[in-house]
Amino acid sequence: MQLIHESAGKRLYRDGDRLIKSFDASYSKAGILNEALNQARVEETKLNIPKVLGVEVIDGQWSLIWEYIEGDTLEDLMRKNPEKTDEYLEFFVDLQIRMSKEKVPLLGHLRDKMHAKISASSFPATIRYDLHVRLDGLPRHKKLCHGDFQPSNVIITKDGTPYIIDWSHATQGNGSADAARTYLILKLQKKDELAEKYLRLYCNKTDTAMQYVQRILPIVAASQSVKNRPGEAEFLASWVNVCDWQ
């Protein structure tokens, strides 16, 4: 097996035409199995998704096994061909819109997940209450939401076929909330210009008011804050506190 990527608690290996994602003891068995289940459910859509091939314990660690997809991530392509960034961004947004048209009724609901995360956040009770109220006021959609849709999670094969990877956070819910999360991810990565271009393009293509997505951002920021990632707290708090709480 060839180690191709390593991050906190996870390692990715290539084993021929298989991709093996190995987890350390900090990940729960239930969470790992849920990731496999999410991906298997999304496989049933018309999207191109690496197929789940198995779940095994390898060298004492729970591991997920998928098809290995050969290609470049959209993030890599943007970095290699900066003059084509706008073209790639349009492709990215079109793919997200296509994804949001799919329905996967057995997935968990984004609204429930976000309510739980808001409750678990460290913001004062008054702010948490207003976030809950704002979340309840959103239209109740059942669109497929990726939960971490960013250029690094789209692989383009040599023939131009896009594969969407990393479905561990997949839910069904409000597509604009998923877009708000993409915008926030780009901002956290310090890709401010790309984030603003992305949001304008998404709103234009979906005929969505930018103010509507912006009203969702504090909810998404509060949800993200429970991960307690170094360097994110102040930035996320600034998005939550940008609201005019009444």
Image (cartoon, rainbow, N blue to C red):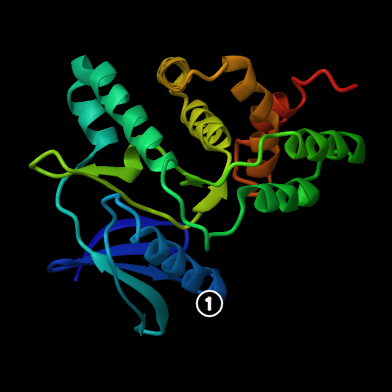
Would you say 200 lies left or right of 214 here? Answer: left
User: Relative to 6, does residue 76 appear above or below in the rendering?
Assistant: above
188 vs 118, nearest the viewer:
118
Give, as a three-letter code, the residue at label 1. Lys
Q: Which residue is mark 1?
A: 29
Residue 225's x, y, as percent? 67, 42
Would you say 105 lies left or right of 234 here? Answer: left
Q: Name the residue at 38% across, 42% down.
A: 99
User: Relative to 205, does residue 183 appear above or below in the rendering?
Assistant: below
Residue 19 in view here: yes
User: Relative to 78, does residue 73 appear above or below in the rendering?
Assistant: below
Q: Name the residue at 58% across, 39% down.
A: 174
Residue 179's x, y, as percent? 50, 32
Q: Name the residue at 83% across, 39% down.
A: 128
Tell me the quarter of the image containing the C terminus. top right
Tell me the quarter of the image containing the N terminus. bottom left
Quadrant of res 40: bottom left
User: Relative to 91, does residue 103 appear above or below in the rendering?
Assistant: below
Residue 190's x, y, as percent? 47, 24
146 vs 72, nearest the viewer:
146
Residue 57's x, y, as percent? 38, 84
Label 1 residue SS: helix
